[in-house]
Image (cartoon, rainbow, N blue to C red):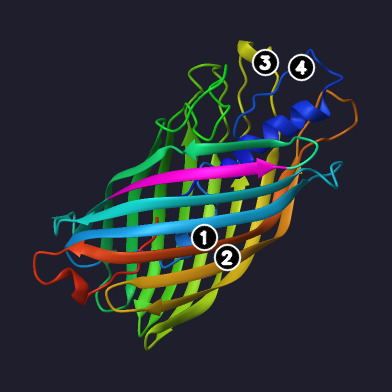
Amino acid sequence: MIGGIICKLAVGTAFVAALVNAPAWAYELGMPGAEQKAGITLGGGSAGVPSPGIYMFDQFATYQGAYAGPNVPNGATVKTAAAATGFLFVPGWNFLGGTYDAVAVLPVYMAALGAPINAQAAGMHNTYLVPGELSWKLGDSGFFLKTGLGMYVPDGTISGPSGLSNVGDPWWTFQPEFIVSYLKDGWNLTANLFEEFHTKNPITKYQTGDIFHAEFTATKTIGKWTVGPVGYVVAQVTNDTSSAFYNYAINANRYTRIAAGGLVGYNFGPVALNVWLTDEFYSTASGKTPVAGVDLASVPRGWTGFASISYRLWAPDEPASSKRPQLTK
């Protein structure tokens, strides 16, 4: 469940660099972007649940882009690399007619920003936990529904006077989800909708606005191969709330980013491999700044390469090597 260091590290810094002539205003070097990396669920995720067992998945991602906005045509370049190891627990329990599962993911990051910012950071991002999800199979229609509540725990690499000088975030993020899938005859048609609700930074009392995600998969499995288009929309849907720590200045940077791409997967038997690419063909940002008449809002636009492998560690009914799921978080 690779998170949003791309926005977290850069946007606040970009605003400070742009507003060096207005020292009375301060903007949190925090994350007005997403806690979760947009597009990470596209690598095989669905509303279905595999048979009982303990599953493991490893995810990798790299992002290459640059910041742009209404008055920031050529902003700092952004380069990131990330990896995460996750576990899916399917105990075989049923509740309210749905199948229960739980998830835990441990992500690590590195990020580098080019001129004029020239900043680097690396470390552990916040752990992602889903104490419970429920998946319902709608008869023989091929449709599945899933809902759950995830959360990012503030246990990442946290440093600096505001707690935001590295890749961890000192606040909690709660992430309710709703997923609908058609899984039949080799098809995986999935819409994954979720929203991030951030608590206040306990150090500065600044609070990032809510972030909405919509991620879409339309793949077909033929033999051992899986191919198809993928895409996502991510947008900040509420404003930030400032505090006395910043004299109540707000890093107003409402944004929308839309990307499309494709996925290729191969089933090796005990291990499934998925690789997918997305390109942000649309991004926009807006927000007031202390510079009269100039909107210095900016948002990154670029492409992301993803890869994931998934496999079953243990199952009560058969050897772990006999089946493999399509997993991502």
Does the magenta portion include 60? no
| Sequence order check, earlier mark of 2 and 4 | 4
| Sequence order check, earlier mark of 4 and 3 | 4
Residue at x 70% of width, y 19% of height: 249
Residue indicated by mark 4 = 25
- The answer to whether residue 245 is visible is yes
| Sequence order check, earlier mark of 1 and 3 | 1
Q: Residue furthest left?
A: 317
Residue indicated by mark 3 = 248
Q: Kindly report which numbered mark, 4 or 3, lies closer to the viewer in this rendering.
A: 4
Q: Which mark is residue 204?
A: none
Q: Is residue 119 positioned above or below 4 on the image?
A: above
Residue indicated by mark 2 = 231
* Dot 3 amino acid type: Tyr
Residue indicated by mark 1 = 215
* Dot 1 amino acid type: Glu
What is the quadrant of residue 139 in the picture? bottom left
Main SS category, magenta section: strand
Does the magenta portion include 107? yes
Count of labels shown?
A: 4
Structural distance between the alpha carbons of marks 1 and 2: 6 Å
